[in-house]
C-alpha cells in the first residue's frame, strides 16, 4: 500500500511538526527520513522548545532569527538538514492543487494609466 501525502502530513504532525499543507509529498518523505536520522543521533527536534531549537541551530552554525510560531517549522527543517548534512527539499512545494499557468493579461491599445495619470506602454505616439 502506498503512503499518501495526507498520511505523511498526519505522521509528521503526530511527531510534532506543523508543516505547510502545500509541502510536496517528496519533501515530506525527505523530512521523515531526516527526522529518523536525527532520532538515531539522539536528537528529537520537534520536542525542543524555542530556546533549545535556537541554541542548537547556533551550535550548527545556522543563522537564526527569532523562533516563533511562524518560523518554527522552517528552523526545525534547517536543523534537521544541519544535523544530517542532507537537504530536505524535494520537488517544488505545491502552491495549489489545481494550479494553472499564470498568463499576463494583454496590455490595452491605449496603454496602462497609473494612479498619477502617467501612461505606460502606449502603442501609438
Image (cartoon, rainbow, N blue to C red):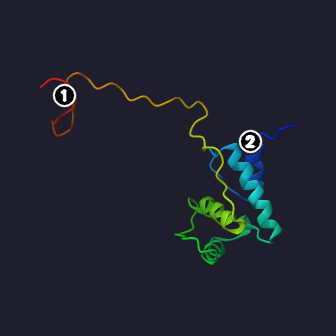
Measured in 3D between alpha carbons, the distance from the residue under mark 2 to the one under mark 1, in whole angstroms, is 49 Å
Furthest residue to the left?
125
The residue under the point 71% across, 49% down is: 28
**Quarter of the rendering containing residue 18:** bottom right
Q: Which mark is residue 92?
A: none
Position of the N terminus, as image quadrant, is top right
Look at the image and tell me whether residue 13 can be seen.
no
Look at the image and tell me whether residue 50 can be seen.
yes
At label 1, counting other C-alpha atoms closer than 10 Å, the crowd grade (few under 14, some 14-19, many 20 or more) is: few
The residue lying toward the viewer, choosing from 37 and 52, is: 37
**Quarter of the rendering containing residue 91:** top right
Q: Nearer the viewer, mark 2 or mark 1?
A: 1
The residue under the point 38% across, 29% down is: 104
Give the structural element (helix, strand or loop) at label 1. Answer: loop
The residue lying toward the viewer, choosing from 2 and 12, is: 2
Furthest residue to the top?
109
Left or right? Give the position of 87 relative to 64.
Answer: right
| Residue on which disc 1 sits | 122
The residue under the point 73% across, 41% down is: 5
The residue under the point 73% across, 59% down is: 16
Q: Which mark is residue 6?
A: 2
Image: 121 above or below 68: above
Question: Residue 49's spot in the image, x, y percent?
Answer: 67, 71
Amino acid at each position: 500500500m502506498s503512503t499518501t501525502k495526507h498520511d505523511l502530513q498526519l505522521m509528521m504532525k503526530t511527531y510534532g511538526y506543523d508543516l505547510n499543507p502545500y509541502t510536496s509529498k517528496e519533501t515530506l518523505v525527505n523530512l521523515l527520513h531526516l527526522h529518523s536520522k536525527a532520532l538515531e543521533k539522539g536528537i528529537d527536534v520537534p520536542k525542543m522548545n524555542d530556546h533549545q531549537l535556537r541554541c542548537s541551530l547556533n551550535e550548527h552554525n545556522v543563522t537564526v532569527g527569532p523562533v516563533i510560531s511562524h518560523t518554527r517549522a522552517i528552523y526545525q527543517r534547517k536543523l534537521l538538514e544541519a544535523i544530517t548534512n542532507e537537504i530536505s527539499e524535494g520537488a517544488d512545494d505545491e502552491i495549489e492543487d489545481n494550479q494553472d499557468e499564470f498568463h499576463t493579461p494583454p496590455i490595452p491599445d491605449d496603454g496602462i494609466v497609473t494612479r498619477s495619470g502617467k501612461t505606460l506602454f502606449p502603442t501609438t505616439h
